[in-house]
Amino acid sequence: MKNNKEQKVQQIFDSISGISPTEIPPYFYTRLRARMEREQSLEKTFFLARPAFFISSLCIILAVNIIFLMSQKHMEKPAGHPGIESFAAAYGLENKSVYE
């Protein structure tokens, strides 16, 4: 039985020794490298080009704008801040009638 296994192993080694290496076409590695670089660049830009990315970023921007606008509505003018009326009065630009 041990002899039978050794014969099979020897047959396998003999069949392997008859195998010759394959010929690689010219410029194979150059084309392979170019294809790999092209696929890597597509993967990077593909994430940004997804519709889900655009929709979620637009929703976030819209929500931040709405929150900002709502907070601006509720703010009051500071007490010491002069209005347009006091500016006009200081420079004599009040709305007076010509007949006064």
Image (cartoon, grey):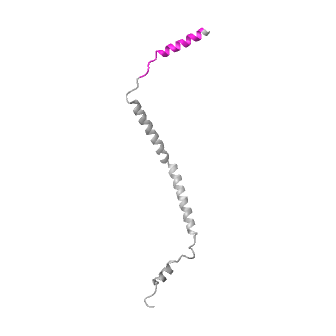
The quarter of the picture where the N terminus appears is top right
Single out the residue that lies furthest toward the left: 26
The percent coordinates of residue 66 (x first, y second) are: 55, 62
Relative height, residue 28 to residue 54 (above, below): above
Number of numbered discs present? 0
Instruction: Give the residue displayed 53% in from the left and 52% down from the top.
Output: 56
Instruction: Give the residue displayed 42% in from the left and 33% down from the top.
Output: 32
Relative height, residue 92 to residue 20 (above, below): below
Q: Nearer the viewer, residue 80 or 76?
A: 80
Instruction: Give the residue displayed 44% in from the left and 38% down from the top.
Output: 37
Queried whether the magenta region covers residue 25, the answer comes back as no
Q: Which residues are magenta?
A: 3-22
The quarter of the picture where the C terminus appears is bottom left
- Magenta span: helix, strand or loop, mainly? helix
Q: Is residue 97 left or right of residue 76?
A: left
Instruction: Give the residue displayed 57% in from the left and 66% down from the top.
Output: 71
The percent coordinates of residue 19 (x first, y second) are: 46, 17
Single out the residue that lies furthest toward the bottom: 100
Queried whether the magenta region covers residue 15, the answer comes back as yes
Relative height, residue 96 to residue 75 (above, below): below
The percent coordinates of residue 9 (x first, y second) are: 55, 13
Single out the residue that lies furthest toward the right: 1
The percent coordinates of residue 64 (x first, y second) are: 55, 59
Residue 27, image quadrant: top left
